[in-house]
Image (tube, grey):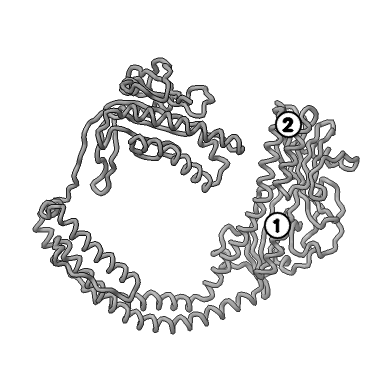
Amino acid sequence: MLDKNHVTSAGRTKASLTTVLVGGVTLLILLAVGSVLWLTLSSASRNTFELLGQRATATLDVLESQIDGQLLSVMGGVGEFSRQFADGRLDMNSKRTKTIDVFSGFLASHPQVTAMLYVQTDLESLVVSRVEGFTIEIPSTPGSLARRQFALDGAAASGKPFWAPPIWVTEVGEAVLTYIAPVQRGDELIGVVIAPVVLSRVAEFLLELENKSNLSAFILHDQDRVLSHPRMKDTDFQITASVAENPLPRIEDIPEPAFDLLAGGGEESSFLLSYAKNVTDARSDDTTIIITRDIEKFGPSVWTIGVTLQRAIVGREVDRLINTSIIGVSILVLAVLLGFVFARHLNHQIGRLVSAAAALTRLDVATAPEVPDSRISELSEASKAFNRMIAALRLFEVYVPKQLVLRMMQGGKAVEAIEERELTIMFTDIRGFSTIAENMEASEIADLLNTHFDMLAEPIEAEGGTVDKYIGDAIMAFWGAPEDMPDHAARALRAAAEIQSRVRTDNERRRKSGDTPLAIRVGIHTGPVVVGNIGSRNRINYTIVGDAVNIASRIDSIAKEMATNEDCIVLVSGDAREHATSEPEHSYALEPLGAREIRGQEGTVSIFRLDAKS
């Protein structure tokens, strides 16, 4: 079989390194770069529209993200407040101070919200507003009763949170959107939570986009009403409407010529519709291109976000593309010449590496030639590394029988060392870690775990234990291998006592600094396991497997079921305690907790609680 494979491999046509590097690299440069340049020149118009579509899509994505960032968090917060009023956690009478503080905190973190209101069905209200940068409670005014009654009527009719029609406030030159969430106890409406919202940051984004990117973007409400546009504050228009109507400026009130295309003017741009994603319409005339997207997230009326571009800008893009392509052809010719010279140099240097590697495959270390240095830094480093490897192998050859290594290489087998031993296994983890990590950044979680693992691993290793692995917030460690340890259980219990002491000290520091203390669980068991190199042929781990490992893990889990506020609870099996009692003096006490059933195991296991002496 080996002979047949050898013949098959030898019979294949093989190219020399010179041919691959010199001819192959040069040909690839010609084909790849030349093809790209040719396709670029032949499809300049199509590529321009594709780039334009992607640019418009990206702009619409960012604009939609800006809107979502301003409004979705408000919807979530107001919805939560309505639930808290419904179940009594918030109340405008008995818990008025708490409610004001909660509203003030929400306003502080949501600058787009101008005020927070809770209105009962009898129109009794609690209003917290932002005045000159400060959040304060303000009294109700007679003029606001109609708007609050409108909110109550709408909540009673819909039975669920809703966005009221936007209102244009001439004094501030902005549209105000109002989110209303009903507060219900059972089927009874007891009030509403109201949050007026302005889109100041979105308007600033639109103005910045127009000034810096030659793009004009806008937001329409119900197709023909303008919710936000860069030039709205500079336009005079009169708005008169009741609360229930839509008192926003119409598109004809804003000096934007591109709005003429929204009524079906110009022609549909099939190129842009093909290359722009999530686009509702794309139209153009002799001077302007307009691209729009409809969104239906904030009330029954459709919002239309759009972007306009000038066709003159597109023409300049085409000219730049052609000039760049001409330069690219010149660079291609130069690249081919340089690639030819460079490939010949690489071929010469790599050939030397191949010659030296061929000698090493035969373990002919003594006669393997050293690879000369190169002016190319990577090849120079490779040469130095190869020469250091040759020197190291020459030392290695003194201690390892050459023929044995050759037989292992030919057979392709790894040395396996598996045996059964009685060991002591420890599992640790952090109670409620998922809850703790919910409000933390990824870097903060990593820092917390690294500090925690350092604190626990040090006493484990100080007692001769082996940290087998880290599993999320958990540690698995064992004593008694690879070297024999007659007192492996005693060592594990001493390490656990030290861990408990350190956790208590660290939690005292955490409480003083205002940080959340960590509740640690530790499970210890002694029993027979299989230990050794376990894994695949290409990668092995020195680890342990067996029922004793599972029992130690289950004992750690038992601590989760115990209602305790201890900083660190350590549970020890009867087998581990019995094995460790040969030590006359120790720094811990063991309290019997009785026999417990272990999930997945027959019978019961005696459990003891360890308490480190102060």
User: What whole-number distance in Å separates the C-alpha atoms at marks 2 and 1?
Assistant: 32 Å
Residue 601 visible, this angle = no
- Residue 339 vertical placement versus 554 (above, below): below
- Residue 408 vertical placement versus 186 (above, below): below
Q: Position of residue 601 (x, y in %)?
A: 33, 22
x 31%, y 29%: residue: 488
User: Contact, CB < 8 Å: mark 2 with mark 1?
Assistant: no
Which amino acid type is shown beneath numbered disc 2?
Leu
Which amino acid type is shown beneath numbered disc 1?
Val
Category of crowding for the residue at label 1, using alpha-carbon neighbours closer than 10 angstroms: few (below 14), some (14–19), many (at least 20): many
Q: Position of residue 289 (x, y in %)?
A: 65, 69
Where disc 2 sits, the SS reads: loop
Q: Quadrant of residue 116?
A: top right
Nearer to us in this view, 434 or 40: 434
The residue singled out by tag 1 in the image is 202
Q: Nearer the viewer, mark 2 or mark 1?
A: 2
Where disc 1 sits, the SS reads: helix
The residue singled out by tag 2 in the image is 90
